[in-house]
Image: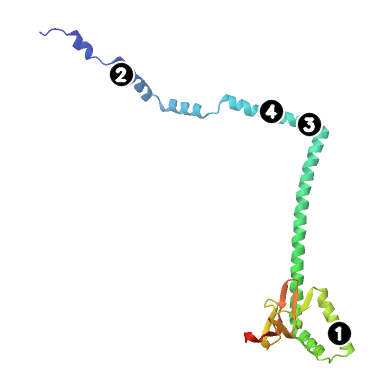
Amino acid sequence: MSEFNTEDYVNGMDDVDKLANQEKVEQTDHTSPAEQVEETEKASEPSQENSQEQSQDAQSQDASEDSLTPLGKAKAEAAEYLEALQRERAAFVNFRNRVSKEQDRYREHGVVDVLTALLPALDDIDRIRANSQMDDSFKAVAAKIDKTFEKFGVEKFGEAGEDFDPTHHEGILRKPDADASHETVDTVVEAGYKIGDRVIRAARVVVAVPQDNE
């Protein structure tokens, strides 16, 4: 029979710290699902301090409203009504301006349609006027027509001797001129018409050009 060795027996025993760790793991593993859910709910619930702070804020707000005198409440309501009235007034002003612009645009379209339809007659009147074949009554009628279009913002343009402008003149013929230093209007065949900056019809002209350019 072999002799009992005390040192070998002690060394073969499990470490105390290792056993303690195993007990903790076993306790954790044996936690029931209900206990785990309860712990999760407790962690997700807001703290009691936050709930108390929110309750105090609501109470202080209610207290501040209740602390207003009848005159103070009336002033607060009057301020709200004034702000709403100012918003409604701004909306009405915008609506009125938009309607006014639309009316001006429709009005201009109507004038353009009438002017375009009467352009051949207006050209004939200009030709008769240029040839001095008008009597006094015809001149009076032509003057009334011109004044009527001026009343609606129609401007007639195109004069002999003025500088040639491609945005306002349509050159139907180029005429060399020894005295011309640059392109100018020699003869107006048909007058141009515009409303404001909008050209309804460009003036059709004969263009005098320097003779060296030909």
Q: Position of residue 22 (x, y in %)?
A: 32, 20
- Circle 2/circle 3 CB separation < 8 Å: no
The CA span between labels 4 and 3 is: 15 Å
Q: Which comes before the other along the chain, label 1 or label 2?
A: 2
Q: Quadrant of the C terminus?
A: bottom right
The CA span between labels 1 and 3 is: 77 Å
The CA span between labels 4 and 2 is: 56 Å
**Residue at (76% x, 86% y) in the render:** 123
| Amino acid type at image mark 2 | Lys
> Looking at this rendering, what residue extends furthest in the right direction?
136
Q: Position of residue 130 (x, y in %)?
A: 80, 89
| Amino acid type at image mark 4 | Gln
Q: Which residue position holds label 2?
A: 18
Q: Quadrant of the N terminus?
A: top left
Q: Nearer the viewer, mark 1 or mark 3?
A: 1
- 191 shown above or below 38: below
Residue 68's disc is: 3
**Residue at (83% x, 77% y) in the render:** 148
Can you tell which quarter of the image residue 17 is in?
A: top left
- Circle 1/circle 3 CB separation < 8 Å: no
The CA span between labels 1 and 4 is: 85 Å
Q: Which residue position holds label 4?
A: 59
| Amino acid type at image mark 3 | Leu
The CA span between labels 1 and 2 is: 122 Å
Q: Secondary structure at mark 4?
A: helix
Q: Position of residue 39 (x, y in %)?
A: 46, 26
Q: Secondary structure at mark 2?
A: helix
